[in-house]
């Protein structure tokens, strides 16, 4: 068995907040890395930031800071997020690392020297947002980007090109002779037909912006951000430096190198990356695991659409483990998954609170009640033990088999077969009845042993994703942490007088209605803020067109034809104005008299339900409440500025 593992996420663009969708890859890789460590493998888990390119240069300039300061801040925020999500990476690469930049520049020169890169000129449709050129036939309607839908622009410039055409045939041969190179197979087929439809040489430099690695022999050119980014997988291991140990261990001599990516970046990883490696005669050691997207009911998550969900928000309400659980469980390898609050809460209640959380608290309570808190040893058998043990062994086998294949969802399902079986075992054996019968003491002990032993196994199997819960389960059944070794996990560890510990419930059941209301309110609040942010700014001259004065209400009556309206007579300095206001649901006419309020005095008069209104009284209002803006000391007629 291969005792090593190198797993990487794509490096994230340093352009903004990470939402729940693109945190998927990182959580999935973390789960996989933890599984491999539990299997006793020496594991290198890589993640990091993609920090060069026009998009980032533009974002920095919009924020009014230098690009380096901009990416430093984003990297800090991203690392804080990963820490909060318990992402246990071994290395966090940044493409602005000096050693990375140096290697990228050297590699480019090497490719140039080998004539795998040549100088030419390019004219094409470029999407700044996706950092990608598109051919005419690939474009969307009105020359928009087929990926993000934003307008593309025609860019013409002297450029370097990478010879993709030259490597099309060897790449096809490689893919054919390595059937598991791209998984799942649908993605592999997609790549094969793309190559078969004819590869064009790839434009790999730009001259229209500055923020990137310069071509040393022609520094007006910045190296294409994807060449820069892809090499992170090697520079992180020391490739190109004098410290090659990790490169040798985790790349050259390793049968388990995995790049996990989303479907949107398949072409870069399945075509450009292996071609670059071939051109440099570096062994293609990696396999690609391609996942789909996490979508919302409204489609892909995006900040501008207002449907983005952020992991911090969920974690602070429901804890880290439930978010990790949801993400790992939601995406079958290859297909898209869905995020909705309903689904999140449903999964939380059914699978975490009911199936698992309850099982732990019931077991602990019963062992306390029936065995004085001490986990007993096996005694007299019950008719249900054999089937439970079988399910436990099957769950261990199947969970491991699916983790090996990066089928996280299936691995979790395999574990839940056991969780459900243990719950059923409680119903079958009915310990509360055994406890009433003196002759069944032996069987009761056996049942309690089986419950605790099953929980020990479950804790080991869920440890890659329920990172906070797994140690708590062990603690509650009085078991020491053993690094959650999965290699030798089996049923039948002696209980050795372990004592159970009663703990707070692992997952409190949630009230679906209340939770949904909470998020609905939050969404409305966010869209209010957004609306406000979108309101155009006005100049002081615009503001000074509005004349505001203090007026004292000297009389007030109900409007005769409208129950929501009040008609007030307001003294403003020496004049008296009649003003109609929609406040009758909040104020009685008599309580209005004597109030000194703020009045807009230069509004054109209008008739409201047949009554003339010459101005407007200002109020603070939301959906539930309304309050007049009042002053105490200032006399009527005072200007409000
Ligand atoms: N910087 C490039 C990767 C370079 S790797 C040499 C990039 N970055 S990204 O920040 O845009 O995306 C990071 C990862 O998140 C990608 O794998 C991408 O597919 C994934 N996802 C982005 N949105 C997603 C969802 N809504 N759902 C699941 N994964 C998604 O691409």
Image (tube, rainbow, N blue to C red):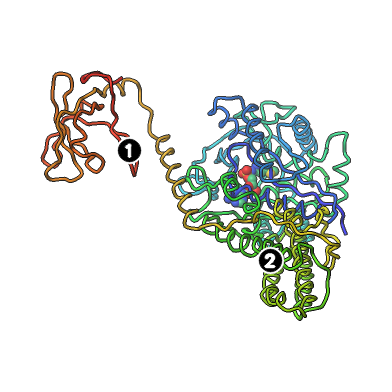
Q: Name the residue tied to disc 1.
A: 621
Residue 87 numbered mark, or none: none
Front-lying residue, 619 or 158: 619
Disc 1: residue Cβ within 8 A of ligand 1's nearest atom = no
Can I make out residue 270 in this image?
Answer: no
Q: Residues within 10 Å of mark 1 (few under 14, many from 20)?
A: few
- Residue beneath the point at 80% across and 35% down: 110
Residue 416 numbered mark, or none: 2
User: Which numbered disc flags the more N-terminal residue, 2 or 1?
Assistant: 2
On the image, the x and y values in percent for residue 201 come to: 67, 44
Q: Residues within 10 Å of mark 2 (few under 14, many from 20)?
A: many
Q: Quadrant of residue 374?
A: bottom right
Separation of residues labelled 2 and 1 (CA atoms): 51 Å
Marks 2,1: beta carbons within 8 A: no
Q: Quadrant of residue 423?
A: bottom right
Image quarter where the C terminus lies is top left
């Amino acid at each position: 068995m291969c005792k090593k593992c190198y797993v990487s996420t794509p490096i994230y663009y340093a352009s903004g907040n990470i939402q729940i969708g693109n945190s998927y890859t990182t959580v999935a890789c973390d789960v996989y890395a933890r599984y491999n460590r539990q299997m006793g493998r020496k594991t290198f888990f890589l993640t990091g930031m993609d920090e060069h390119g026009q998009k980032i240069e533009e974002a920095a300039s919009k924020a009014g800071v230098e690009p380096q300061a901009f990416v430093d801040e984003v990297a800090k925020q991203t690392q804080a997020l990963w820490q909060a999500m318990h992402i246990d990476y071994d290395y966090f690469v940044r493409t602005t690392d000096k050693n990375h930049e140096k290697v990228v520049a050297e590699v480019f020169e090497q490719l140039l020297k080998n004539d795998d890169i040549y100088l030419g000129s390019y004219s094409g449709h470029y999407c700044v947002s996706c950092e990608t050129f598109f051919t005419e036939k690939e474009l969307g309607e009105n020359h928009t980007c087929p990926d993000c839908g934003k307008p593309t622009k025609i860019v013409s410039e002297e450029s370097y090109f990478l010879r993709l055409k030259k490597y099309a045939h060897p790449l096809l041969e490689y893919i054919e002779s390595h059937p598991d190179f791209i998984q799942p197979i649908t993605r592999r087929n997609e790549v094969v037909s793309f190559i078969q439809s004819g590869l064009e040489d790839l434009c790999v430099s730009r001259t229209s912006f500055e923020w990137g690695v310069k071509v040393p022999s022609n520094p007006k050119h910045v190296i294409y951000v994807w060449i820069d980014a892809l090499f992170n997988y090697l520079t992180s291991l020391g490739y190109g430096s004098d410290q090659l140990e990790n490169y040798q261990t985790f790349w050259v001599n390793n049968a388990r190198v995995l790049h996990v990516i989303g479907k949107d970046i398949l072409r870069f990883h399945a075509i450009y990356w292996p071609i670059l490696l071939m051109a440099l005669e570096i062994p293609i050691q990696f396999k690609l695991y391609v996942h789909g997207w996490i979508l919302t009911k409204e489609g892909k998550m995006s900040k501008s659409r207002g449907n983005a969900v952020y992991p911090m928000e969920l974690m602070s309400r429901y804890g880290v483990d439930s978010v990790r659980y949801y993400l790992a469980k939601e995406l079958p390898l290859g297909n898209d998954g869905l995020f909705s609050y309903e689904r999140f809460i449903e999964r939380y209640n059914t699978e975490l609170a009911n199936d698992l959380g309850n099982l732990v608290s019931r077991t602990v309570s019963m062992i306390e009640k029936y065995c004085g808190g001490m986990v007993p040893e096996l005694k007299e058998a019950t008719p249900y033990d054999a089937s439970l043990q079988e399910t436990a062994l099957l769950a261990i086998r199947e969970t491991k088999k699916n983790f090996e294949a990066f089928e996280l969802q299936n691995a979790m399902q395999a574990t839940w077969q056991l969780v459900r079986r243990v719950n059923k075992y409680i119903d079958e054996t009915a310990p509360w009845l055994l406890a009433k019968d003196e002759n069944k003491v032996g069987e009761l002990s056996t049942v309690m042993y089986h419950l605790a032993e099953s929980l020990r196994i479950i804790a080991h199997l869920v440890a890659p994703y329920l990172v906070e819960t797994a140690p708590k389960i062990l603690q509650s059944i009085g078991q020491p942490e053993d690094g959650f070794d999965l290699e030798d996990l089996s049923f039948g560890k002696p209980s050795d007088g372990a004592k159970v510990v009663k703990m707070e419930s692992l997952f409190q059941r949630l009230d679906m209605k209340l939770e949904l209301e909470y998020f609905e309110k939050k969404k409305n609040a966010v869209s209010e803020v957004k609306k406000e942010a979108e309101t155009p700014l006005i100049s002081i001259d615009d503001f000074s067109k509005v004349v505001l004065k203090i007026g004292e209400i000297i009389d007030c009556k109900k409007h005769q034809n409208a129950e929501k309206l009040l008609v007030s007579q307001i003294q403003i300095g020496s004049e008296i104005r009649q003003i109609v206001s929609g406040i009758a649901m909040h104020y009685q006419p008599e309580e209005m008299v004597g109030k000194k309020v703020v009045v807009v005095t230069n509004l054109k008069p209008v008739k409201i339900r047949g009554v003339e209104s010459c101005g407007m009284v200002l109020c603070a209002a939301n959906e539930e409440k309304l309050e007049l803006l009042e002053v105490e000391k200032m006399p009527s007629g005072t200007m409000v500025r």
